[in-house]
Every structure is written in C-alpha cells, then in structure tokens.
Image (spheres, helix red, strand yellow):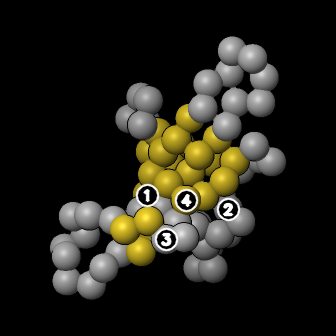
Amino acid sequence: MHAALGDQVVVDGTRPGVVRRDGEVVGLHHGDGTPPFDVRWSDNGRTTLFFPGPDAHVVHFVHPEGNGGGSHVRKR
C-alpha cells in the first residue's frame, strides 16, 4: 500500500455495527509513501498515526498543476 499527501484512507467496517471510516493523509513517514501515515479523520478531525490493516484502502487523487490544491480529481 502506498499513499501521497492529500489521498484518502478508507477503513471498511468488517463486522455488523462497525461503521466505515475515512480520512485524509496529511503526513508520510517514508519517502516511498509506504505506511505508517498521519491521517486526519473526517469523523472527529483528529490526526493519528495509522498502520493500515487488511480492511483499509487508499483512494488516490491527482492534483492538477496550477490549481493551488483547491480541488482534487479522482484517479482511476
């Protein structure tokens, strides 16, 4: 798993009652984008050190040049 700053981490609930969670990658600890990541979670705004498990995936975004980082285009 690899991530870049601004990508989205999604953790799917694997058991009944466990909700899906997502957050933005705001920090990397390795130059190649491998875990762990600093993630700011959308549900509470907190930033935590995140080691992804098998229930997690990264949604990569392309950051268009010259847009000032104001919007993202989802990479397929």
Q: Position of residue 50 (x, y in %)?
A: 63, 48
Q: Amino acid at mark 1?
A: Val
Instruction: Kindly identify which residue carries mark 2.
Output: 35
Q: Secondary structure at mark 3?
A: loop
Task: Say left or right for 68 vs 33.
Answer: left
Callout 1: 10 Å neighbours few (<14), some, many (20+)?
some
Of the two numbered discs 4 and 1 in the rendering, the one whose residue sits closer to the viewer: 4
Of the two numbered discs 3 and 2 in the rendering, the one whose residue sits closer to the viewer: 3
| 22 vs 76: above or below | above
Residue 69 quadrant = bottom left
Name the residue nearer the viewer: 45 or 21: 21
Instruction: Kindly identify which residue carries mark 4.
Output: 59
Q: Amino acid at mark 2?
A: Pro
Residue drawn 46% across the image and 39% down it: 41
Residue drawn 43% across the image and 57% down it: 26
**Gap between marks 3 and 4 measured at Cα:** 8 Å
**Gap between marks 3 and 2 measured at Cα:** 20 Å
Residue 63 quadrant = bottom left
Q: Secondary structure at mark 1?
A: strand
**Gap between marks 4 and 1 measured at Cα:** 14 Å
Q: Earlier in the sequence, mark 2 or mark 1?
A: 1
**Gap between marks 2 and 1 measured at Cα:** 12 Å
Instruction: Kindly identify which residue carries mark 3.
Output: 75
Q: Residues at badges 3 and 2 in contact (C-beta under 8 Å)?
A: no
Q: Amino acid at mark 3?
A: Lys
Instruction: Kindly identify which residue carries mark 1.
Output: 26
